[in-house]
Image (cartoon, rainbow, N blue to C red):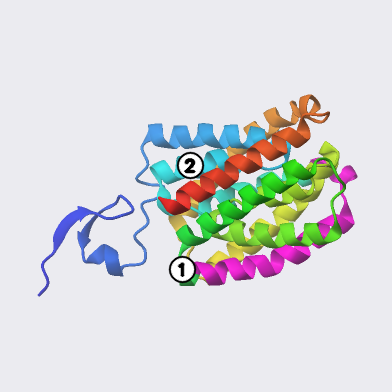
Amino acid sequence: MRAQVSARCGRGCQTTFPTCAVVPDCQPVFDDLTTIELALCGIAAIAGAVIQGTVGFGYALVVVPALLLFAPEAVPVTPLVVATPMVMVQAVAERRALDLAGFARLTAGRIPGTALGAWVLTLVGPSFVAAAAGALLLCAVAASAFRGVRATSRGLEVVAGFASGVAGTVGAVGGPYMGLAYADRPGPVLRATISLAFAVGVVLSLAAVGIAGEIEPGPVRLGFALVPFTFLGLWLGRRLTGALDGGLLRPAVLAFAGAAGTFALVRGLL
């Protein structure tokens, strides 16, 4: 008979080994958060949604680090659950500025990227892919900064959708790739188009992660708990769009995309 050792598992729950290693329904992600930790995650969700509402992407830059600190097992499921209603609302709000053809190209790239991300996730784990995605994103930011303001190409939109699918499925940080592809477009067009592409993409990513067997009830419940916070942040962010929709939008997109690439690279290497 094997010895039973009482301890806390890697997810932070009190358990008895080897039970946690073999029982798949060990789900402390939401229930074991303290009130203070949950409140801090809520504040992060508000701040991330403010960024999302103004720039069109970027909520994960705030939400994912907070979750990695307090509930690492919630990534990527919780950020994807949080994002789904938020981006749908934003897409509807900006629907008159939608670039339908661009949305189709982004989605055409996102579908195979999502499938590849889910497959890679089962082989090498998220750290390697996060580091690679971060390095590629930093290269894309540098290239965009050096080339200056220039109309995007159709091929670039497909590539951006593909990269977004891979990075979004692995680490829920797929928005910056699409943001870079639309950095030179008017603010409403950027937000409407990538929000709708994002809405389709997060649903696909959740489905792919579920097929890969990586979805548990705890992270889903936490995501639903954070949704009201994101709606508040989105409401605040939409009131700041006028300040960025002039000459500040492109620098903001490059800055947040660069921050996302740095975060993904550091996260993958640590």
> Residue 245's spot in the image, x, y percent?
81, 31
Instruction: Find the magenta span and give its range.
Output: 92-121
On screen, residue 73 above or below 231:
below
> Residue 209's spot in the image, x, y percent?
54, 65
Which residue in the protein does label 2 denote? 65
Which residue in the protein does label 1 denote? 124
Q: Residue at x 56, y 37 (%)?
A: 45
Amino acid of disc 2 = Pro
> Residue 250's spot in the image, x, y percent?
77, 36
On screen, residue 192 above or below 121:
above
Amino acid of disc 1 = Val
Q: Residue at x 48, y 53 (%)?
A: 75
Mark 2 or 1, nearer chain start: 2
Q: Residue at x 28, y 66 (%)?
A: 21
Magenta stretch, overall SS = helix
Asked whether residue 128 appears in the rendered view, the answer is: yes
**In front: 58, or 231?**
58
- Outermost residue on the front side: it is 146
As measured in the structure, the alpha-carbon distance from the residue carrying label 2 to the one carrying label 1 is: 21 Å
Q: Residues within 10 Å of mark 1 (few under 14, many from 20)?
A: few
**In front: 68, or 40?**
68
Q: Secondary structure at mark 2?
A: helix
**In front: 255, or 12?**
255
Asked whether residue 172 appears in the rendered view, the answer is: no
